[in-house]
Image (cartoon, rainbow, N blue to C red):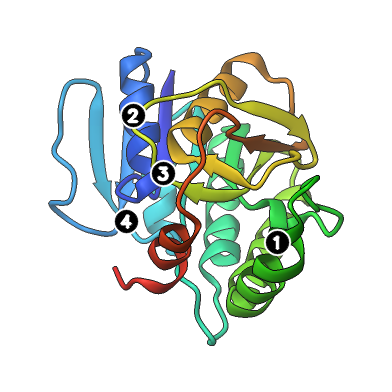
Amino acid sequence: MRIAVFGANGPTGRHLTDQALSAGHEVVAVTRRAGSLTERPGLTVVVADATDPAAVDAAIAGTDAVLSALGARFSKEIITTYSASATAITGAMARHGVKRLLAVSSSIADPNWRPTGAHFFNHVLDPLVNRRLGRTLHEDMRRMEAVIRQTDLDWTLVRPSGLFEHPVVTDFHTAETSADGVFTARADLAASMLRELAERRYVRAHMGVITTAVKPNIAKLIWNEGVKKK
């Protein structure tokens, strides 16, 4: 399968690209940064802004599916990366007849998500970090979800919990709407997307994904994901 990966140079996108190539897929890696990815067998690098309709249209032409792992940092300012890119990507897919889309969102997009037994997270970290520091980011994620749900594409909105780095894929867990857990390793997020691409268990649905085998350092996670500059 020929897959377009948006945000291919990002922390999740790199896992997606590597795992897709290892599985035998052809990958069109879409990134804003020229020279950030090295072409190799099965990989085509396309430099494009995911919010530019013309650039996105060219990147999607000739692909069979689109996987979006685009991301943004917390900001007090209004964020439009997710919704603007979703508009450009879904428009291009419709024009080229590409039906399958998987896009990374967040468990926060589910208003009822509260991990079981996670008292400190639910009552301290979530209100402070996600609902306050990450408010504008998650507002735009919800706008992105709304854009995608309004299409007739075979979409899956992928909702990880707190993202962290782990070098290998673990025995991750998926569930419809959102998953009951606090953390998701990026390697597991990528693996869950590629598995869903093949199995199609959550078409036109939301897929929560969590990691249960390992846990990150919470302070380091908050710093790396929400505070530290790129």
Which of the image's four quarters has the C terminus? Answer: bottom left
Label 2 vs 4, first from the N-terminus: 2
Q: Is residue 53 left or right of residue 111?
A: left
| Whether residue 50 can be seen here | yes
Q: Earlier in the sequence, mark 1 or mark 4?
A: 4
Asked if the residue at tag 4 contacts the one at tag 2, i.e. Cβ–Cβ closer than 8 Å, the answer is no
Residue behind mark 4: 48
Q: Amino acid at mark 1?
A: Phe
The spot of residue 216 in percent (x, y) is 47, 46
Q: Which residue is mark 1?
A: 120
Q: Earlier in the sequence, mark 3 or mark 4?
A: 3
Location of mark 2 (residue): 27
Give percent across and percent down for residue 40: 15, 27
CA–CA distance between discs 2 and 3?
A: 15 Å
Classify 10 Å Cα crowding around label 1: few (below 14), some (14-19), many (20 and above).
Answer: few
Q: Residue at x 33, y 46 (%)?
A: 30
Q: Inspect this view and state whether residue 61 appears.
A: no
User: If the image is split into quadrants, where does the N terminus sit?
Assistant: top left
| In the image, farthest residue toward the bottom | 77
